[in-house]
Image (cartoon, rainbow, N blue to C red):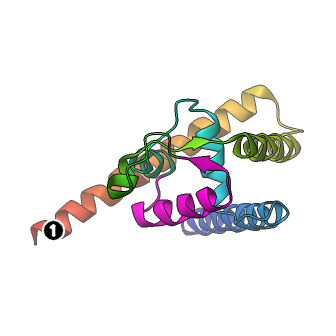
Amino acid sequence: MERLFESFVFSVSRIYKDIQKIKSREMARMGLRGAHALYLYRLSRAPDGLTGAQLAALCDEDKAAVSRAMAQLEQAGLVVYPDDDDQRRYRSRAVLTDAGQEAARRVGELIASYVGAVQAEMSDARRRSFYGALNEIADNLHRLTDEHAEGDQMK
């Protein structure tokens, strides 16, 4: 069991680090940061826009990190806030500009390219099985960490 744990943790860590490297490298080519990739991707799937709170929830990110990244994307001309209320910017919907839509399209192409390359030799059945198991592990770990956090708060 210990060896399985080591293998699992090492593999997940390697995958995460490689994804971070890919995001950093590819986004730098567009003059952006790796953190911007997921926000552009999510916004491209929400034509009516998303609030910072919605992005934070969808991306499982810290609200402050989302706010900083969105300010950078706005400064780069990739997002606008049509219902702008500077006092409540976090609750205003961010919408991609034409340049933002182009950047998001490029991000989508990069994602499709990398996902296609890493799964090229996998059968559909194996892919479904892998993602099913991975999601089950993620859900179980999330549940366990929440339970332990609640137990720590009761002490």
Name the side, left or right, on which 10 lies relative to 57. right
Tell me where residue 86 sits by quadrant. Answer: bottom left
At 79% from the left edge and 62% from the top edge, which residue is drawn?
22
In the structure shown, which secondary structural element does the residue marked by tag 1 occupy? helix
Task: Point out residue 38 in the picture as x, y percentages from the top left corner.
Answer: 63, 51
Of the pair 41 and 30, the residue shown nearer to us = 30
Quarter of the image with the N terminus is: bottom right
The single residue placed furthest to the left in the displayed view is: 155
Q: Main secondary structure of the magenta part?
A: helix
At 56% from the left edge and 65% from the top edge, which residue is drawn?
5
The crowding category of the residue bearing disc 1, from other C-alpha atoms within 10 Å (few below 14, some 14 to 19, many at least 20), is few
The vertical placement of 76 against 6, above or below, is above
Tell me where residue 15 sits by quadrant. Answer: bottom right
Q: Amino acid at mark 1?
A: Gln
At 89% from the left edge and 39% from the top edge, which residue is drawn?
121
Name the side, left or right, on which 103 lies relative to 66. right
The magenta stretch spans which residues?
Answer: 60-80
Per the image, the residue denoted by label 1 is 153
Quarter of the image with the C terminus is: bottom left
